[in-house]
Amino acid sequence: MSIEKIVEQALQDGYLTPAMESEVGKICDNASELSIEEYMALDRLMGSLLTGEVVAVPRKQFINVMEELVLTEVIAKVAEIEATSESSLDVGDITAYALNRLPPMYATTEEGANYQRQRAKTELQELISQQVKEAIDRYIDKPDFYPERQALGKNTGNEVLSQVSSLLKVYAPNFEQKSQS
């Protein structure tokens, strides 16, 4: 999506979401030079933000209490296992597996978060422990299907281009015909 389209969408909605903000940042970071139109769109966005016509949505207005509860449980269990064996476990993989099998528990205030924590500890602690145990068991028993997979992280434009290029080479090797001299 272009800067102009993002600004147009923000003006239409009245909100600049974190995803929109991030996309504008990526475009600016990867461009060697912005066009006059892009500068004008950014100027229009800045003016709209200053006047309140567009509101920037904060990065995180809510938390999923289940994430912190599961992560705490996973870290404790993984530490026990790693202390008594040669195994090295991926906390992120295990946490994601367990979270995908548990209900989310969102809160927007500290009081709401405390309520959700208490509720989860009394009503769901057994289920959380069971899902974390299953996630660890699955992780330990998983075959090494895709050893080349990469963890989520911040990619630069060049890394994305090289990944797309690699995919094209694998899945469309004859897409670009070599010139025959």
Image (tube, helix red, strand yellow):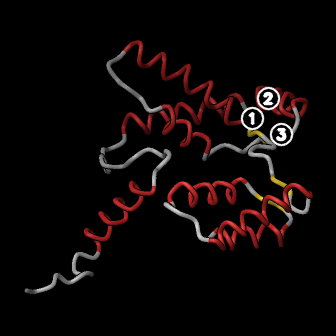
Mark 3 in CB contact with mark 1 (< 8 angstroms) = yes
Callout 1: few (<14), some (14-19), or many (20+) C-alpha neighbours within 10 Å? Answer: some
Mark 3 vs 1, N-terminal side: 1
Image quadrant containing the N terminus: bottom right
Q: Using the image as rendered, state which of residue 132 and residue 58 is in the foreground.
A: 58
What residue lies at 74% left-to-right and 45% top-to-bottom?
59
The residue wearing badge 3 is 107
Percent across and percent down for residue 131 are 58, 36
- List the residue tagged with mark 2: 117
- The residue at which mark 1 appears reads as 65
Using the image, determine if residue 86 lies above or below residue 49.
above
Asked where in the image residue 54 lies, by quadrant, the reply is: bottom right
Q: Which callout, 1 or 2, points at the residue further toward the start of the chain?
A: 1
Residue at the farthest top position: 83
**How many numbered circles does the render carry?**
3
The reply to whether the C-beta atoms of the residues labelled 1 and 2 are less than 8 Å apart is: yes
Around disc 2, counting alpha carbons within 10 Å, would you say few (fewer than 14), some (14 to 19), or many (20 or more)?
many
Q: Which element carries disc 1, helix, strand or loop?
A: helix
Mark with earlier residue (2, 3): 3
* Residue 37 picture location, percent across and down: 66, 73
Residue at the (48%, 16%) spot, across then down: 80
The residue nearer to you, when weighing 141 against 145, is 145
Task: Give the residue type at disc 1.
Answer: Val
Within the image, what quadrant is residue 109 found in? top right
